């Protein structure tokens, strides 16, 4: 069981990231920007205004003024620099989700409330008046309050997430699955990558660039996404969406697998090949259109492929590879022949990535391609009529959990 405290910490990060994604999706103009971890957690900049937002998740904590006092003082520091003409004017927003205690905060804020609850404090037995130390009078504090929005009744984690998924479905006109596993997963990767950039300017992205980066039909292996979903549920969702068909149609299915030479295990690969063949073949005499899948193993050496084939044959696991005799050239017509109960062919092994397109051209039936890659997609299908699912995995062993 995953550590509950760790999950709560991760949720805090996700809460902020989800809010950033939601704000980005709903910017009005393509050139409007967001900066992740800028002045505050999220900085919004449009053609007409800029807003620095502190966004926190305290679902198990009672609201107290002390929780947001330091962020407010930090914002007032920035405001003081604005007053001196050293920085451009912006708006400030603090939003948080709390278990209880929201009624302790009286809104709208008055100058007195601002001072008493947030700016006057004691540290190491010394009284501080933060506004006085910054040289700000009541008139300046009134101006600061006019630029400040405090929301202690922000939506909880699940409600915010559901709103985000609904926005993605509406904007991209997609299913809930695609919204979560394609667009949200990709968006989370983009935001996370921005957040770790050391230079502030590198943490800024426009709405146009953000949309371009998340609008891809690839399922990325995102450790952050999996950490909140849970690996078991993540694999179950992919299996339900793509690999849980009860009555398998007689389609021509291609499984493209990337091999990591540093962790390669022949026995592990054989186990995966047996699984693919067992689940995605129908070879009984009663089957009117018998079939078996194609498999291409990207990154496997020529020598290892030869040894693998030799071992499969020794175990009576029959396959075709498109080479009719020793020394023959590859023949796509040979490999596309129908496997059936008589020839007992359980798999069609593709030796080279260059052969895939040749084989596809020979097939007149419905075709589906399932590509599992480690870092970068290695095969591109130009025929939009062919279903091409691209799933990033951390290693070969994960594929069995998906299919």
Image (cartoon, helix red, strand yellow):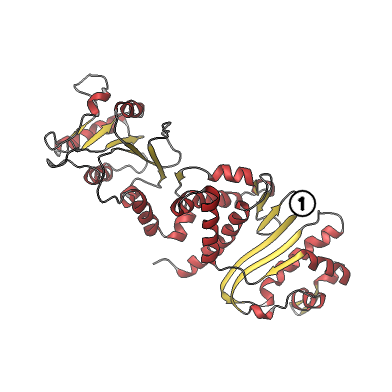
Answer whether residue 112 is visible to the viewer in this image: yes
Crowd tier of the residue under label 1, counting other residues whose Cα lies within 10 Å: few below 14, some 14–19, many 20 or above: few
Circle 1 residue: 48
Tell me how many marks there are. Answer: 1
Q: Secondary structure at mark 1?
A: loop
- Which picture quadrant has residue 133? bottom right
Residue 360 vertical position relative to residue 11 in the rendered view, above or below:
above
Answer left or right for 153 relative to 336: right
Quadrant where the N terminus is found in the figure = bottom left
Q: Residue at x 67, y 63 (%)?
A: 54
Q: Relative to 322, does residue 97 appear above or below in the rendering?
A: below
The quadrant where residue 236 appears: bottom left
Residue 144 placement (x, y as % from top left): 81, 66
Identify whether 173 is placed above or below 75.
Answer: above
Residue 259 seen in the figure = no
Q: Could you tell whether 137 is left or right of 172 in the image?
A: right
- At 61% from the left and 68% from the top, the residue drawn is 154
């Amino acid at each position: 069981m995953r550590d509950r405290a760790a999950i709560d910490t991760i949720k805090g990060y996700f809460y902020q990231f989800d809010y950033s994604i939601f704000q980005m999706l709903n910017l009005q103009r393509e050139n409007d920007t967001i900066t992740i971890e800028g002045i505050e957690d999220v900085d919004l900049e449009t053609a007409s205004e800029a807003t620095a937002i502190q966004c926190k998740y305290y679902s198990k904590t009672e609201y107290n003024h002390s929780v947001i006092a330091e962020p407010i003082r930090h914002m007032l520091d920035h405001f003081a620099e604005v007053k001196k003409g050293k920085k451009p004017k912006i708006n400030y927003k603090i939003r948080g989700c709390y278990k209880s205690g929201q009624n302790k905060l009286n809104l709208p804020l008055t100058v007195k409330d601002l001072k008493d609850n947030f700016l006057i404090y004691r540290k190491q037995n010394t009284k501080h008046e933060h506004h006085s130390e910054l040289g700000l009078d009541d008139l300046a504090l009134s101006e600061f309050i006019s630029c400040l929005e405090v929301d202690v009744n922000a939506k909880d984690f699940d409600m915010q997430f559901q709103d985000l998924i609904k926005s993605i479905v509406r904007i991209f006109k997609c299913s809930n699955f695609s919204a979560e596993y394609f667009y949200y997963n990709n968006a989370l990767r983009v935001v996370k990558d921005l957040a770790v950039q050391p230079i502030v300017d590198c943490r800024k992205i426009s709405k146009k660039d953000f949309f371009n980066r998340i609008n891809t039909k690839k399922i990325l292996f995102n450790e952050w996404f999996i950490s909140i979903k849970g690996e078991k549920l993540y694999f179950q969702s992919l299996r339900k969406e793509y690999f849980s068909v009860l009555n398998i149609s007689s389609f021509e299915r291609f499984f493209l697998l990337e091999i990591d030479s540093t962790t390669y295990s022949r026995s592990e690969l054989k186990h995966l090949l047996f699984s693919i063949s067992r689940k995605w073949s129908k070879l009984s005499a009663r089957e009117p259109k018998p079939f078996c899948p194609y498999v291409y193993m990207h990154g496997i050496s020529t020598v290892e492929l030869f040894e693998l084939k030799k071992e499969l044959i020794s175990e009576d696991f029959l396959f075709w590879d498109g080479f009719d005799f020793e020394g023959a050239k590859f023949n796509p017509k040979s490999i596309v022949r129908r496997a059936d109960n008589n020839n007992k062919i359980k798999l069609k092994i593709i030796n080279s990535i260059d052969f895939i397109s040749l084989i596809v051209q020979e097939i007149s039936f419905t075709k589906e391609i399932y590509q599992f890659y480690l870092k970068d997609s290695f095969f591109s299908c130009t025929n939009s009529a062919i279903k091409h699912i691209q799933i990033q995995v951390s290693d070969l062993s994960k594929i069995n959990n998906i299919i």
